[in-house]
Amino acid sequence: MSINEYLRKNIKESPIYDGVVPADKLSDDSGVSSEDIIKLNANENPFGKALELTNELSLINIHEYPDPNQIKLRKTLSEYTGAKFEQIVASSGSDELIDILIRLFLDPSDKLIDAQPTFGMYEFFAKIQGAEVLSISRKSDFSIDTDSISKTIDKSTKLIFIASPNNPTGNTIEKDELIWLLNQKIMVVVDETYFEFCGESYMELINEFENLIIIRSFSKWAGLAGLRIGYAITNSELINRIIQIKQPYNINSAAEHVAIKAINNKERLFEKVKIIMEQKDKIYNFLSNKNNIRVYPSKANFVLCDLEDISADEVFEGLAKKGIFVRKFSNKFLNNALRISAGTPDQTRKLLLELEKLI
């Protein structure tokens, strides 16, 4: 007997998603001490300890189940975003929302439009669901190709995710492009994970378009990637449907407590966001002055660049030997490219010093 006989076909064929490698593993592989590892490969916030939580976690009643209705957290999110309580639901990271929304809207015979290059979890969860993924290349400036999308949409096309700012390219969708998508009568999810870095949102369209969903995360701006906290903003009917199929206790008590503290201390965190964006600009300006590199404008906490006459593999390996890790891309959508997350000022100094030697 083989377990494969019982597996769903699309599960057999679904690829494994390669997650972020932890610093300890990077240390083991590179021979650089974990204290000296500089992780610029996952768009993480390097100021993750800004909230000073050590003494507070002991106050959480971890022996009790968390609130399945997330009342305290949703009220706090309502105050933070300006959306109504009934228009918000929290999740275990934005990844959980991607999974839930795909299960809500896609049958195995349905189609998801994937505007590549973009965040890989949209395709990942759609394939697990057994839906068909229609990969549509973006234009040379990474804006969405509305002509190609228009030719692709049919009665079985149900859903599109648009990251804005987009990961890994850093650009945002224009309002007229988004409204065009919303008028195509498909569900449109705008992933605003990097909202706090750019300050641009289309939340005001929620009350106008019932097919619009905004998703956000605490992982990047608040430095809480390890606690897995995200949330959705959309119409109340759809919020109730998300609550209907989410895990009852999807937000653990520690995550809820810290998320509320992050919002209550947002000004302190926004100061760190400002520093991160200053470092992003330094990296962008450095790369822009190199003749053999094409660097793309970014409204997020990272920079994408094409290494036209240089091997991305060689630059990646050269940095890794020094304990500096960035994200390498080599596929049909991005060839010979690197995405570099912004870190602390000291991390930026070390990064640029090593890049100067390599490029």
Image: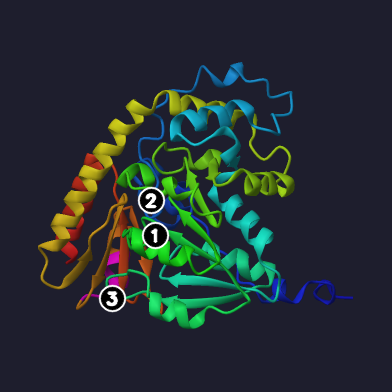
Counting from the top left corner in percent of width and height, residue 29 is at 44, 57
Q: What stretch is highlighted in magenta?
A: 310-316
Please identify the quadrant where the N terminus is shown. bottom right
How many residues crowd around disc 1 within 10 Å: few (fewer than 14), some, or many (20 or more)?
many
Residue at the image point whose x is 33% and y is 26% from the top: 268
Measure how far apart labels 1 and 3 are at the Cα level: 15 Å
Disc 3 is placed on an element classified as loop
Counting from the top left corner in percent of width and height, residue 135 is at 49, 77
How many residues crowd around disc 2 within 10 Å: few (fewer than 14), some, or many (20 or more)?
many
The reply to whether residue 74 is visible in this rendering is yes
Q: Are marks 2 and 1 in contact (CB under 8 Å)?
A: yes
How would you classify the magenta stretch by its main secondary structure? Answer: helix
Residue at the image point whose x is 41% and y is 35% from the top: 48
Instruction: Please name which of the two marks, 2 or 1, marks the residue nearer to the observer.
Output: 1
Q: Name the residue under label 2.
A: 43
* Left/right of residue 2 with respect to residue 231 in the rendered view: right
Q: What residue type is labelled 3?
A: Ser
Counting from the top left corner in percent of width and height, residue 294 is at 20, 70
* Left/right of residue 168 with respect to residue 346 in the rendered view: right
Residue at the image point whose x is 69% and y is 49% from the top: 241
**Residue 320 belongs to the span the image colors magenta:** no
Q: Which amino acid does label 1 sit on?
A: Asn
Disc 1 is placed on an element classified as loop
Q: Name the residue under label 1.
A: 167
**Labelled disc at residue 231:** none
